[in-house]
Amino acid sequence: MYRTLERRLIQRLRDFLRRTYDLDLVKIVVEQPPKVELGEYAMPLAFELAKKLRKAPRKIAEEIVSGIGPIEGFDKLEVAGAGYINARVNRAEMATNLLADQKPKVAVPPGKILVEHSSINPNKAAHIGHLRNAILGDTFVRLLRFAGREVDVQNYIDNTGVQVADVVVGFLYLEKKNRAEIQDLIDRKEDRGPSKIPSRPIDYICWDLYAAVSKWYEQDKQNLQARVRTLHEIEAGGNETAAIAELISVAVLRRHLETMDRLDIEYDFLPRESEILYLHFW
């Protein structure tokens, strides 16, 4: 659509230059303005013509803008600075044309499609990169459903990986907290007693703790043995360390799902790696 508009704009400019100045330019440069407020297209055309026409660039730009007339798909042309010509697309008209140009759907082959996306490690708060991937995945799902496909959405939860193990190490070795104390952090209300100091969400706490554990490993490489032991216990299951990992990962996952719910992103399945391990599927 934008390429079509650009070609239309260039052709109208060529016609105007030929008609008004008897000039036939082989190439008309079209740039992207530095700010969206300046429009979708910017042209330094007047600067290129200044020497040939022996006029100030701004004067030439004003003559072009006032004389070229309306162009289909464009709201208006404007003169900017010393002689730039900025073109603004008529977005309302573009949207109307796009909606009216609904081509027949392609034939939908039989069968269900399974799309897996997001898959954020449940060890700390989601960041903008996670949200980008989730939005890309959700957009793909919506496109498939719009095309008539039957789609199930899966969010694979890696709750037994080294990232979760590192947060468990942080609680056990740095914070010296047991399962009950970690549960208390998760269960805290927004207000803590008469002080009314907001408690921090568990995924935010884990974020800082994950960073602290990384520094702890750097201080003494022997500390990495704690990671190895913790990871093995989580993978084995049926012990206190695995129970703490389960507690933390579920709490953080709930926070992730709350975030996705605000973006209207939903999942049909949440398969967890721990279940695959404990059922000996892997």
Image: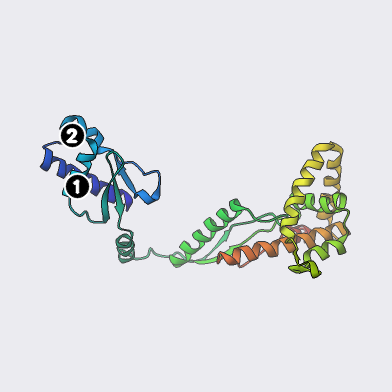
Is 216 in front, or is 98?
216
Badge nearest the viewer, 2 or 1? 2
The disc, 2 or 1, on the residue closer to the chain's N-terminal end is: 1
Horizontal placement of 70 versus 117: left or right?
Answer: left
Q: CA distance from mark 2 to mark 1?
A: 21 Å
Q: Within 10 angstroms of label 2, few (less than 14), some, or many (20 or more) residues?
A: few
Mark 1 secondary-structure assignment: helix
Indicate the position of residue 227 as horizontal and vertical percent values.
82, 46
Image point (39%, 64%), residue name: 107
Mark 2 secondary-structure assignment: loop
Indicate the position of residue 278 as horizontal and vertical percent values.
79, 60
Residue at the top extreme of this rendering = 51
Image point (15%, 41%), residue name: 17
Image point (73%, 68%), residue name: 190
Image point (11%, 42%), residue name: 20
Is 277 in front, or is 1?
1
Please say which color scheme the image uses: rainbow
**Amino acid, disc 1:** Arg
Horizontal placement of 277 versus 110: left or right?
Answer: right
The number of callouts visible is 2
Is 225 in front, or is 235?
225
Q: Within 10 angstroms of label 1, few (less than 14), some, or many (20 or more) residues?
A: some
Residue 282 visible in the snapshot? no
**Amino acid, disc 2:** Lys
Indicate the position of residue 150 as horizontal and vertical percent values.
51, 68
Q: Quadrant of the C terminus?
A: bottom right
Checking the image for residue 55, the label placed there is 2
Checking the image for residue 12, the label placed there is 1
Is 225 in front, or is 206?
206
Residue 87 visible in the snapshot? yes
Q: In which quadrant of the rendered view does residue 46 lie?
A: top left
